[in-house]
Image: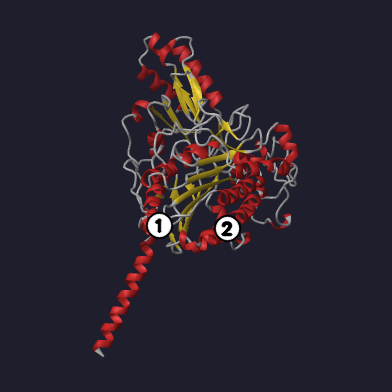
Amino acid sequence: MEKYIKNLVFLGMVILLSLNTQAQLLRNNGNGSPKLVVGIVVENMRPDYIDRYWNKFSDNGFKKLYNEGTVFSNFKLEQHVQSYSTGTATLFTGVYAATHGIIGNTWYDRLKEEEVNCVEDDYYFTVGADTKAGNTSPNKLMSNTIGDNLKIFTMGKSKVFSVALNDASAMFSAGHAADGAYWFDEVSGRMISSSFYINTFPDWVRLFNSDGYASIYTHRNWTTLLPITSYEESLEDEYILEKGYYDKWNTFPHTTTKYVNKAGNYKPLKTTPFGNTIIRDFTHELLNGEDIGADHCTDLLTVFFSSMDYMNGAFGPASMEMQDTYLRLDQQIGSLVTLLEKRFGKDNMVVFLTANTSASYPVEYLKEEFNMPVGNFSPESAFALLTSFLNITYGDGKWIEHISGQQVYLNHKLIEKNKVDRKEIIEKASTFINQFQGVKIVIPSYDLERGGSGNNANAAVYNSYNKNRSGDFSYILEEGWQPTYKFKKVNYTDQTHIPLVFYGGGIQPKKIKSRKTAIGLVPTLCDLIGIPVPDRCHGEIMEELTN
């Protein structure tokens, strides 16, 4: 009997050791690492879309990831400016804009005395089309990405690729050392890249572009995937507060050709499910055309789907268009995951799903339907009054040099010429703007330069302040308030809650409710792959993933 018990105890220890070894498998370098890590990033995705549309999803898309994966239900992207460029840079470097330097899609360069784009770089040229959409590089990104660290650690043997509709998303996820970053050119309708990454297009990319998918999808009307009467989770199609395309076309079917012709380019295609279809199909061709997941070095592929892109505000999270986009996206993700499992096997790969921005409800919808205390803040009106105030106080002059991304750049040359105390004028201007309805707080640069605690309510601004790129003061709007301009459309959101799900080898089905932040993604991926966490990474490993 005693011998039987000892054998039983020994057998139990062997089983526990085996289970522990399996759980730790992906944390070891070499053959124990996943062959491939695939990041699926959905732009403008609210986590609550999953619950809202759950009953309409298929079994192979979102449901598979959420039912069989580890779900982090309290994942936050806390930064001052919520844009796809800044969000992507933060997710894939493990540091905030204060360190990686991408404070927005654009910012004001005081030396050049002009607004600069976060990726524009005329030293490089477009590969794949006769346009300037590829005159770009990730050189303004001042931190390494997870892909960069993977390439360095494996001495270039790991392969890193990215695919997106937007250039910054592709480049800031791929990093500086990637084998390829591809994105959609709104002018030519082709998938392109920059000579920063490649000089000659692979044949498989040429063949893909030769099929002319942008033109094909432009001539297809966007109709609902399901019978229009079955979209009970959304507002009615003719909801009066939906602005729609060009502030007038807001009902199904959507005539894609009409929108593209009015724009004069393929940009509207990015706001329809057809844009996501192009990305899905291109990713399938990339997996067929590139030697990915073929050796013991982990490869990294990031795929971006742009949910409604810049039309979020025109339709809103509760629209029928949004639901249809996600029902189709569910199928597109499902087909991609199925292909990955057939090609590599679930145990040999890890897929993570997240977003680089969330989405806010339109102000008019919140006010009219729910009596919420929200409104529109007009930067143009506010800063016109500020200009008058500064002229009265300090004399006529162009005291405000530039306004961008909830930041204000004062004219340092004029301030010095008139011997005005810079701190004084910043303080007076900040106090003036702080009086406007809808402005929660204004923080001067001299306060931001002292640094701030990550635990205070204004941590997002401190996390995002970069001395060489940020303005003289930054402002935050009250919750639900949104900036509006007369002649330009902005895809604004103040929401910080984004999804995060891991699926694949060594990942157990569970839900983690404790609060996690976006800068924790990189160290967690490093831990999964089995490479060192970057020295400058500020995030913490999400240990619940493999424990």
In the image, is 510 to the left or to the right of 227? left
**In x, y percent, where is residue 275?**
64, 44
Decide if residue 115 is in sight here. yes
- As helix, strand or loop, the secondary structure at mark 1 comes to loop
Residue 118 in the image: above or below residue 174:
above
Q: Earlier in the sequence, mark 1 or mark 2?
A: 1
> Within the image, what quadrant is residue 202 found in?
top right
Question: Residue 243: percent from the left, percent from the top?
Answer: 68, 39
**Dot 1, crowdedness within 10 Å: few (<14), some or many (≥20)?**
many
Query: In the displayed structure, does residue 13 sit left or right of residue 337?
Result: left
Above or below, comparing residue 178 to residue 229 in the picture:
above
Query: Residue 363: in sight, yes or no?
Result: no
Residue 430 percent across, percent down from the top left = 42, 25
Q: Amino acid at mark 1?
A: Ser
- Count of labels in the image: 2
Label 1, on which residue?
Answer: 33
